[in-house]
Image (tube, rainbow, N blue to C red):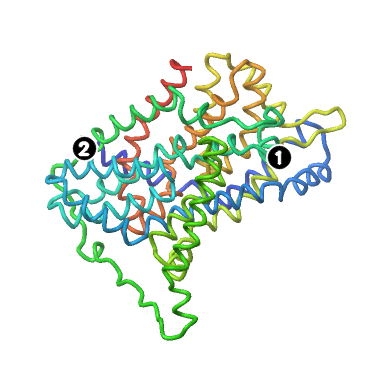
């Protein structure tokens, strides 16, 4: 029965879900048609809104790209790999390995989502080398399940966007927010910490319960690490490129800045601060500008979807907030529907569920925030729901259905040497459990 559900879910996703870039274009046309029909604006007027908004999120786009690149590069630092190899010697049984990889991947994803994806895959391979008889597809699925907590963590694009403030936040929130909201009101609330605690307790146990009687061990060739590149140091220029002293001087300068900043402003995180800390931590652990530059170069391929899709999401946002002669917008009309369908008690849960659905088509927390923020935050304001609650419901909805949206699993699967079909059935079960936990929290704890 379980294998049939697994195969059905994977086949449905692979057969009917278009690529994220294609869906961004399709969604553009859908919003265009809805805007013309619902607000009575002409095609040239809607095209003007689209074009005016197309480049409005360039700063946010660059920030999201750097979150992934810096986290990915840090996870590939040799000291991180050595630590993971040592940790892989701790579990003595396949069940312990499944639990351990879930917890390590969760911890890493809470710190930085790009870091967590790579650490989870690398640690799964290390465990497969150390623990005999562990079911490799479930081991990799358990590593990916750690990604569930990323949007409630230190690199969550929605809470950090709230904390950063600025013109982008005002646009994305539909004018509801003109001042930043600190992470103490989003990441470090009882609601958010309770969700994370329940996932940390339940997800490893659920993954362990899914262990099959007959394990499929990893093919030996999947567990062989490629040799480290040889960096030439024949000339003065090459020795300067690979200078550890130069790298340490820059890291020391950054450390002085961060200490002074936090001493003067308190421990308030923003997107730029998080990116900076990961950038300089990566430079420190790689040891030299040359080695870090190569790690960044290896990471850049993962940001292609962010770079090409985010302008389309910004254009969609432009059409959502583009007003007709009477001041009416498509975003306002959709917000009014949500207001009519829900109450202050049910709105956070409805926001979470709608965000989970939308994430199937916009597999990017930042892109989804750009599309859904102008709709849900104004609706929540009318119903008396605090904007930080609405924003975190969007954030957790985005994280939730990543379990069956394979877009962000691709980097992890590439490292592990598996395909989406190998892990999706386990992820479907994790989706059901986490949906009950997160949805219940937004209904009973808000």
**437 relative to 132 in the view: left or right:** right
The N terminus - image quarter:
top left
> Vertical placement of 219 versus 49: above or below?
below
Q: Residues within 10 Å of mark 1 (few under 14, many from 20)?
A: some
Residue 66 picture location, percent across and down: 53, 53
> Vertical placement of 215 versus 180: above or below?
below
> Vertical placement of 48 versus 414: above or below?
above
Q: Which residue is found at the position 67% from the left and 25% from the top?
A: 378
Q: Earlier in the sequence, mark 1 or mark 2?
A: 1
Q: Residues within 10 Å of mark 2 (few under 14, many from 20)?
A: many
Q: Which residue is found at the position 80% from the left and 33% from the top?
A: 323
Q: Nearer the viewer, residue 105 or 361?
A: 105
Q: Which residue is found at the position 13% from the left and 42% from the top?
A: 213
**256 relative to 284 in the view: left or right:** right
Q: Residue beneath label 2, please? A: 208
Residue 366 picture location, percent across and down: 57, 43
SS category of the residue bearing label 2: helix
Q: Which numbered disc covers residue 167?
A: 1
Q: Nearer the viewer, residue 180 or 131?
A: 180
Residue 267 picture location, percent across and down: 50, 36
**Separation of residues labelled 1 and 2 (CA atoms):** 46 Å
Residue 240 picture location, percent across and down: 47, 76
Mark nearer the viewer, 1 or 2: 1
């Amino acid at each position: 029965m379980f294998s049939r559900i697994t195969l059905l879910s994977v086949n449905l996703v692979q057969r009917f879900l278009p690529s994220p870039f294609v869906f961004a274009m399709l969604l553009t046309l859908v919003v265009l048609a809805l805007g013309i029909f619902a607000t009575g604006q002409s095609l040239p007027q809607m095209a003007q809104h689209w074009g005016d908004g197309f480049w409005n999120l360039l700063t946010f786009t660059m920030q999201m790209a750097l979150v992934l690149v810096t986290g990915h590069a840090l996870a590939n630092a040799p000291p991180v790999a050595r630590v993971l190899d040592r940790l892989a010697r701790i579990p003595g049984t396949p069940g312990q390995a499944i639990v351990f990889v879930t917890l390590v991947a969760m911890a890493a994803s809470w710190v930085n989502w790009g870091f967590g994806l790579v650490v989870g895959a690398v640690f799964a391979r290390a465990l497969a080398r150390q623990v005999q008889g562990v079911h490799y597809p479930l081991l990799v699925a358990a590593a990916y399940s750690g990604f569930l907590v990323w949007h409630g963590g230190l690199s969550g694009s929605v809470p950090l966007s709230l904390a950063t403030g600025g013109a982008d936040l005002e646009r994305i929130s539909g004018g509801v927010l003109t001042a930043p909201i600190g992470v103490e009101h989003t990441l470090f609330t009882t609601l958010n910490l309770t969700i994370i605690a329940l996932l940390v307790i339940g997800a490893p146990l659920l993954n362990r319960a899914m262990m099959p009687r007959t394990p499929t061990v990893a093919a030996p060739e999947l567990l062989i690490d490629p040799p480290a590149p040889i960096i030439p140091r024949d000339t003065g220029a090459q020795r300067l490129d690979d200078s550890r002293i130069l790298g340490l001087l820059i890291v020391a300068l950054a450390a002085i800045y961060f200490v002074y900043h936090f001493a003067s402003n308190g421990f308030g995180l923003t997107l730029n601060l998080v990116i900076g800390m990961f950038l300089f931590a990566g430079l420190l652990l790689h040891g030299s500008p040359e080695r870090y530059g190569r790690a960044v170069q290896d990471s850049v391929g993962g940001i292609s979807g962010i770079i090409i899709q985010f302008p389309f999401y910004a254009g969609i946002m432009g059409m959502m907030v583009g007003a007709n002669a009477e001041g009416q917008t498509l975003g306002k009309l959709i917000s009014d529907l949500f207001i009519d369908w829900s109450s202050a008690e049910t709105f956070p849960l409805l926001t979470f569920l709608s965000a989970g659905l939308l994430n199937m088509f916009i597999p990017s927390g930042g892109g989804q925030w750009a599309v859904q923020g102008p709709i849900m935050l104004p609706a929540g304001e009318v119903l008396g729901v605090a904007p930080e609650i609405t924003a975190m419901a969007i954030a957790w909805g985005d994280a939730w259905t990543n379990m069956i949206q394979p877009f962000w699993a691709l980097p992890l699967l590439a490292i592990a040497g598996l395909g989406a079909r190998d892990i999706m059935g386990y992820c479907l079960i994790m989706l059901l459990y986490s949906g009950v936990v997160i949805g219940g929290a937004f209904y009973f704890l808000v």
